[in-house]
Each structure stands twice: as structure tokens, then as C-alpha cells.
Amino acid sequence: MAANARENSIVADLALAPQGHLKIDWVEAHMPVLSRIRKQFEAEKPFKGLKVTICLHLEAKTAYLAKVVQAGGAEVTITGSNPLSTQDDVCAALVEDGVTVFAKYNPDPAEYKQLVRKSLESKPDLIIDDGGDLVTLLQSECPELGENIRGGAEETTTGIIRLKALDKQNLLKFPMVAVNDAYCKYLFDNRYGTGQSAWDGIIRTTNLVVAGKTVVVVGYGWCGKGVAMRAKGLGANVIVTEVDAIKAVEAHMDGFRVMPMVEAAKLGDFFITVTGNKYVINGEHYDVMKDGAILSNAGHFDVEFSKPDLEARSESIRTVRKNIEEYRLKDGRKIYALGEGRLVNLAAADGHPAEIMDTTFALQALGLKYVNDHYKEMGKTVINVPYEIDEQVARYKLESLDIAIDTLSDEQRKYLESWQA
């Protein structure tokens, strides 16, 4: 398998493998839940004889997930879900470990799309997707490559939105498990993972202080909650913009100022978009922004703030620091965009902490096994992660932390199931 992987893969430089192995070894040491599942998979071989294609941000934690799935007997092919989050040394290490890889850091758009397509040419039985990229490609351009697919698992809010749109139109061709909607995903990964890693990317890229600045968080879903919470902890004055009245009330009661974007645009020093939507920051907002405002995005696609509108208002654009583009507007103001508007926590940092991705990728691994075990009766639809799997991952995590919790007595359980006091 290793020889085939080396022969078939497309990566930047296989000589980088030693560095990649060190990164993978580091995250493995901090992902005990996934390591426990790996031992289970090694014993049971749930994917024996099957082909699995993975499309995720291709860095060390994802690489370890690929190795866990491989330990379950699968022939694994992997590609990156974002051109700026791929780490070439990790790709090289995976090839040495027998995983077929189609990914490079920062390919041009045409090459990037071709690499994703190549990952499907094995005609996989199962997929793990991020942002619905694999599913969308299979639906729109190469349906013949999806003929063998039993089902898969989806990582992100954006991906779930796309999958549910397909499902609503009866266009989905196989079942997909909404890993993003599991408790152990959005409560921890979206909130604590995005909250920490987005600021990691912003701070290491700008080398600027956050305390005392005004931070505008665009969207108050679980990712937005995490970004706002961390901004507050860093000493920022936080403003939240929302289109959902319930989330807006929640943000207000959490102690944040809430206002429309056109008002927040006048006040912000840092802007972080986390909506999964398009052009939530656009021309009318750029027209009133401060000189020196900094834009970043923690949503899946690079469309949350409008780069065309920013370019149209600019007389010059230059790179002033790695992952920072300076847009000098025609009136002399400067607006800065981080990581080309792509996911700032991955384009400009290393993504979520390993301990966070431990639970998320445990859900991916067990969710994929669930699909393989039950795809015949699941139907071609989007389903939630079964609660039993969600709870199992949480219990594994508690055990890894040496934390014990109480259990209900028979009397307590009976009381909770009764309508009588």
C-alpha cells in the first residue's frame, strides 16, 4: 500500500516527511480518545476492503484521523479542503504511511479543484467531507465517481447547510451524518476550538494587542460565541452583529453590544466573520470603516467579506506581512485583510487545539463506522449523530482526563420516567 501511495500521490515534496511525522506524533500524544478508537479499529477492522476518501484541512490532526481510519482496514485517500491550510510536510509523512494524498499548499484554483477531483477517482465507498466540497463535486461534475459511495460524514456548519439544501430537493445520492450538529462538536469544537484558534491566527499574524480594541463578531452561532468569549477575555470591547433575533438577545444577555453591521463598521478595529453566509461585510461597510481596520474570516469559504467590493474601492493592494494584504482606498484609508479571507485559524495558524479535535475526529471515525454499518436502512438523507455515539465520545474524554461523574440510581431513573411526583 505504501508503494502505491508514493506512486499515485501528488504532493509538494516527499523529502519533508520527517518534519510531518514529528507533527503527527505530537498531536497523537494529545488525542487519547482517537487513540482509543484506533485500538478498537485495529482489532475489529470495520472498514476492511473499503476505500475511504477524506477532504479536510490537511494538517497533523487530520493526518492522525486518516491513520485511524486506515487502521480500521480502509484504503485511504485524502485531499485538502482549503488551499492555505494544507501542510506539505504532513502530506509527505502520510504518503510514507501508505495514505494516497492529493494536496499541496496554495495551489492555484484550477489545480486545487483538480486535486480534490483526483481524490475521488478511486471511487470510494465512504467519504469524510468538509464544507460539502466532495458532495458538491460529485453532484455537479463527476457523478460517476460516486457510484460506490455508501455514505459519509460532514464536518462543518457550511457543509450541513449545503447538504440540507440537496436533501430538501431530493438530490442527495447517499446518506450523510451531520457530525457538525453533534453536541461534542458544536459545544466544544465550534465554541472553544474556533474561539481559541481564530485568535491564535489573528494575533500571530498581526502581532498587535487586542486589549482595549473594539472587536466586531459577525454572527453569534457557536463559533461566534467562542470568538466573542475569547475576545472579551483578551480585554476587547466586543460588538456582535446578527440577523437572528434570538441569538441577538443571547448576545445582549452575555454582555455584548448588539447593533447592525453598518453601525458596527464605524467602530471596529478587528472584524471576524463566522456566519457561513456571503458578503456579510460589503461596500457600504467599507465606506465607513476606520483607517487601519483589520478583516478576518472564520467561516468555511472566502466570501464572507466581499473582496470584490474592497478591490473596487482600492487604488493599490500589497502584501505588508505574511498573510496580510493592505488595501489602500481611494480616500487614503487602509483596510487590512488576513489570510486572503480564508479561514484565519488555518490559513494563518494551525487550526484547533489537538485536545479539541480529539473529540471531533472521534465523532468522525465512529460516525463513519455507523454509516457503514447502517447505510442500507438510512435512506439518502442527512441524519444526526446518534446520541449514544455522542455520549460515548464524551465518556471516553472524561476517562482520558481521569474525571468520574455520578450515575442515576434505579429509583432516580424510574422517577424521571414517571409523571407522578
Image (tube, helix red, strand yellow):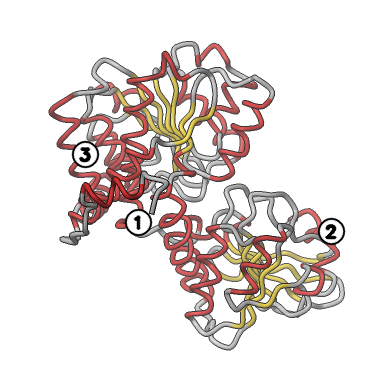
In the rendered view of the protein, which quadrant contains the N terminus? top left
Q: Which mark is residue 123?
A: none
- Residue 153: image quadrant is top left
- Residue 218, x across and y down, in percent: 66, 63
In the rendered view, does 395 fall on the left or right side of 127? left
Q: Nearer the viewer, residue 347 or 369?
A: 369
Describe the element under mark 2 as helix, strand or loop: helix
C-alpha distance separating marks 1 and 2: 39 Å
Question: Do callouts 1 and 3 mark residues in contact (Cβ within 8 Å)?
Answer: no
Q: Nearer the viewer, residue 77 or 34?
A: 34
Furthest toward the left, the residue is: 43
Mark 1 or mark 2: name the one nearer the start of the chain.
Answer: 2
- Residue 49, x across and y down, in percent: 26, 15
Nearer the observer: mark 1 or 2; the answer is: 1
C-alpha distance separating marks 1 and 3: 16 Å
Residue at x 41%, y 32% (from the top left corner): 54
Q: Look at label 3 and name its amino acid.
A: Ile
- Residue 162: image quadrant is top right
- Residue 80, x across and y down, in percent: 46, 39
Q: Which residue is mark 3?
A: 37
Q: Mark 1, residues whose alpha carbon is within 10 Å: few (<14), some, or many (≥20)?
A: many
Q: Which residue is mark 1?
A: 356
Describe the element under mark 1 as helix, strand or loop: helix
In the rendered view of the protein, which quadrant contains the C terminus? bottom left
C-alpha distance separating marks 2 and 3: 51 Å
- Residue 69, x across and y down, in percent: 28, 32
Furthest toward the front, the residue is: 420
Q: Look at label 1 and name its amino acid.
A: Ile
Q: Which residue is mark 2?
A: 312
Q: Look at label 2 and name its amino acid.
A: Ala
Residue at x 65%, y 74% (from the top left corner): 252
User: Is 262 rendered above or below residue 282?
Assistant: below
